[in-house]
Amino acid sequence: MNIYNQLKNSFEKLIVENNFEDETITVDIKTLSPEESIGENTKRKDFPILTGKESMIEATFKGAKGQAFTTARVSFNGKLSDLSDLNVGENPYDTGIFIAVLNAVMKYLKLIDQTVHCKNEEPELCANHVVNFMTENFPDKKIALVGYQPSMLEALAKAGVNLRNLDLNPANIGDTRYGVLVEHGKDNYEEVINNWADVVLCTGSTIINGSIYDYLDLDIPVIFYGNTIAGAAKCLGLNRICYCAI
């Protein structure tokens, strides 16, 4: 299953259904600074966006904004029809552009919400909501947190959740953060996901680097989190939580 072809087909269908294909529509994407992305007054300073490991790009369509976390710092200016030429799913630059634009267009059409990342104290509030959601819906279950999301990791650990954390950033792997060892997202995948976890809480940024395929069609529940995967989750029918984004 090529989910990126599915997403492109869904996007093109939206354009045709809303008569956007014949309009001259410009989509602007800018790479946001860390402060623009997540605020200047975050409680902690180890979010990937603040350590320079990731960037947030933002698409604006008719006033509606859509964002995407990516390691590819890009900007783009063109028409919606130009997106059909992007190498989505293969080129990380093109994939980030497409996902941000998809989020913006679907936000404008009121098909999705929560496409702009929360800021300042809101990541901590979101983490508390996530803890409540996971403990209410998956009590006493073993949870694999995919992606190093510090506020979420700390909140889950403090709540006494049976937790393991997978990440792909070498700067995090092997360190113990908030009492939890950060394990290798590829090398430890089989052990953690297939042989240990009862449920997966997975970063939506996996839609950008293609590692999302590792978390589709599993025999255990998978819940994606964050604003990046807003549009894709709607198109693909994936479970998603995101509490404080707008």
Image: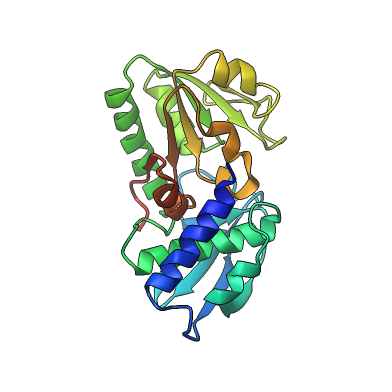
Instruction: Name the residue located 59 percent from the left edge and 28 percent from the top edge.
Output: 166
The image position of residue 25, as x and y in percent, is: 49, 82
Between residues 207 and 138, which one lies in front from this camera angle?
207
The image position of residue 94, as x and y in percent, is: 65, 62
Between residues 135 and 217, which one lies in front from this camera angle?
217
In the image, residue 182 sits, relative to residue 70, either above or below, namely above
Q: Residue furthest bottom?
A: 24
Task: Say left or right for 142 vs 190.
Answer: left
The image position of residue 201, as x and y in percent, is: 46, 31
Q: What is the quadrant of the N terminus in the image?
A: top right
The image position of residue 50, as x and y in percent, is: 59, 51
| Residue 172 visible within the image | yes
Instruction: Name the residue located 44 percent from the left edge and 46 percent from the top edge.
Output: 236
In the image, residue 63 sits, relative to residue 112, either above or below, namely below
User: Which quadrant holds residue 199?
Assistant: top left
Between residues 151 and 80, which one lies in front from this camera angle?
80
User: Which quadrant holds residue 225?
Assistant: top left
| Residue 40 visible within the image | no
Q: What is the quadrant of the C terminus in the image?
A: bottom left
Instruction: Name the residue located 33 percent from the left edge and 60 percent from the top edge.
Output: 111
